[in-house]
Image (cartoon, rainbow, N blue to C red):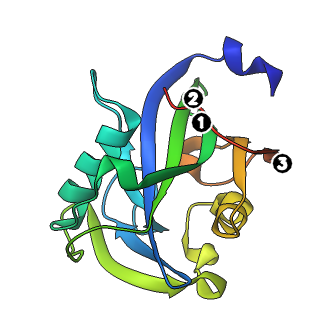
Amino acid sequence: MQDQEKERIMYEATILFLIRNGQVLLARKVKKIGKGKWNGYGGEVEPGETQRHACVREIAEESCGIRVDEKDLIKVADIRFHNTTEENKKFVLHASVFFAYRWEGEASSTNEMADPTWFDFDKVPYDQMIHGDAEWLPIVLSGKRIVMKIEYSPHQAQMIGEAEIQYVDSLLEE
């Protein structure tokens, strides 16, 4: 993954998973890429925001009630999603993945994320998630940290080739 420095990152985003007693909270995406699929909470990092601030803002907006403190976020993955548009143009979305084991409030459905549901780690519905999530989510749920590169066809409909996964001891925050 030496080519990361040369990549043109077009979007910076976060994904946050709440974890409790061997369970992970997922919700169905209502719009955009992954519509109808189970996912964690998150979205684009806005200008002037840190990754942690974006996580806190996104889960509050998308869950309609969950409040997480930035200090309670644990970065578990750094993923570069290489996407292809229908016009065959390439762009990279850099997602920082965080876990939180402490928060306040309960999730409700919103116009961005619906049907918040707790899943046991061994019952996560990978077949109802975006292609490729089954490559990395079980790894981070098992306690490992990773840096990953994955390439997708338009709308992340399918993976192109194999995901490149590198296990790391720690992750940098930007």
Instruction: For the residues labelled 1 and 2, say whether their Cβ atoms are less than 8 Å apart.
Output: yes
Q: Is residue 85 visible?
A: no
Q: Which residue is mark 2?
A: 92
On screen, residue 70 versus residue 85, left or right, reads left
Which is nearer the N-term, disc 3 or disc 2?
2
* Circle 3 Cα neighbour tier, 10 Å, few/some/many (<14 / 14–19 / ≥20): few
- Residue 35: image quadrant is bottom left
Q: Which residue is mark 1?
A: 83
Which is nearer the N-term, disc 1 or disc 3?
1
Q: Position of residue 105 (x, y in %)?
A: 20, 74
On screen, residue 54 versus residue 158, left or right, reads left
Most foreground residue, 79 or 36: 79
Q: How far apart, in angstroms, are the residues tagged by discs 1 and 3?
A: 14 Å
Q: Is residue 126 visible?
A: yes
What is the three-letter code of the residue carrying label 3? Answer: Glu
Q: Which residue is mark 3?
A: 162
Q: Is residue 9 above or below residue 86?
A: above
